[in-house]
């Protein structure tokens, strides 16, 4: 009887663990705040001219499907209007997901997924002091990233794109035309490095799932001693 119970518990634990570890979808999230002058995380990279003087904030929530290789996301920004967005980078678009420079979290790195490529007016919702961009089924494959795909070392390649996005080191960057970047002589008009950025990371495993796995393991240990 004990062996039957242990086998059942083992099978349940394996099925639950497998469904969590090789799930077809991943939830990602991150908060956005002021960028560094060179686009990097102010907490990681020191710039002699400091952090851009902005009060804008934002949030990013997404579901990544590693079977269809698509992204559903909602980006909400306050303190930057849609009219202040600035087209920049390979596709001359304003909002991107970037890889970290040299693989180091927080460092500025190249675009890998263009969040605004092909975006339509219907996907933007303007608020009193900002906007929301919500898109579904955005392809993350290299062939669908426009000119990003043509620049060496930008997109990590289809075999690596999911792991790059779920590594906890990718970041969102919002480019604007605001005169907020300082030089030794004052603000630089419309300098388009990111005004707002935020690292994205997988949403932690729900407590219920972790507790269930732990409970199954405890039951197995107790039954093995019985």
Image (cartoon, grey):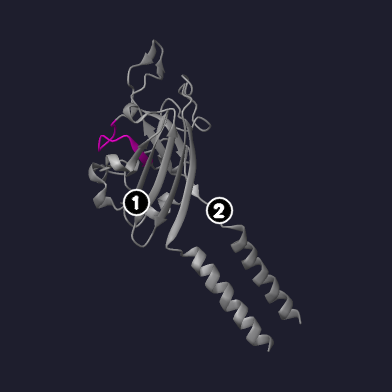
Q: Earlier in the sequence, mark 2 or mark 1?
A: 1
Q: Residue at x 35, y 37 (%)?
A: 95
Quarter of the N terminus within the rendering: bottom right
Q: What is the spatial separation of the Cα atoms under label 2 and label 1, in whole angstroms?
A: 22 Å
- SS for dot 1: strand
Outermost residue to the bottom: 1
- Look at the image and say whether residue 218 sits in the magenta stretch: no
The answer to whether residue 141 is above or below residue 146 is: below
Among all residues in the image, which is located at the extreme top?
Answer: 185
Question: Which region is colored magenta?
Answer: 87-97
Residue at image position (41%, 50%) is: 164
In the image, taking residue 97 as reference, residue 15 lies left or right, namely: right
Q: Residue at x 34, y 47 (%)?
A: 135
Badge 2 vs badge 1, beta-carbon distance below 8 Å: no
Along the viewing direction, whichever of 76 and 45 lies nearer the viewer:
76
Q: Disc 2 on helix, strand or loop?
A: loop
Q: Residue 93, position in %: x, y? A: 28, 36
Q: Is residue 66 left or right of residue 14?
A: left
Residue for badge 1:
136
């Amino acid at each position: 009887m004990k062996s039957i119970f242990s086998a059942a518990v083992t099978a349940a634990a394996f099925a639950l663990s497998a469904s969590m570890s090789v799930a077809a979808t991943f939830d990602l999230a991150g908060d956005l705040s002021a960028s560094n002058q060179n686009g990097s995380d102010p907490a990681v990279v020191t710039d002699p001219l400091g952090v851009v003087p902005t009060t804008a904030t934002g949030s990013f929530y997404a579901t990544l499907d590693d079977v269809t290789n698509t992204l559903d996301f909602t980006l909400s920004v306050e303190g930057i209007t849609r009219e202040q967005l600035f087209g920049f980078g390979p596709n001359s678009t304003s909002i991107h997901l970037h890889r970290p420079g040299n693989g180091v979290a927080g460092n500025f790195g190249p675009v890998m997924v263009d969040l605004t490529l092909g975006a339509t007016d219907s996907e933007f919702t303007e608020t009193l002091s900002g906007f929301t961009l919500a898109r579904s089924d955005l392809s993350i494959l290299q062939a669908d990233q426009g000119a990003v795909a043509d620049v060496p070392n930008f997109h990590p390649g289809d075999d690596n794109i999911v792991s790059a996005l779920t590594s906890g080191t990718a970041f969102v960057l919002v480019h604007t035309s605001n005169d907020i970047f300082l030089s030794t002589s004052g603000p630089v008009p419309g300098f388009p490095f990111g005004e707002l950025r935020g690292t994205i990371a997988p949403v932690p495993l729900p407590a219920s799932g972790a507790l269930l796995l732990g409970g199954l393991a405890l039951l197995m240990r107790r039954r093995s001693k019985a």
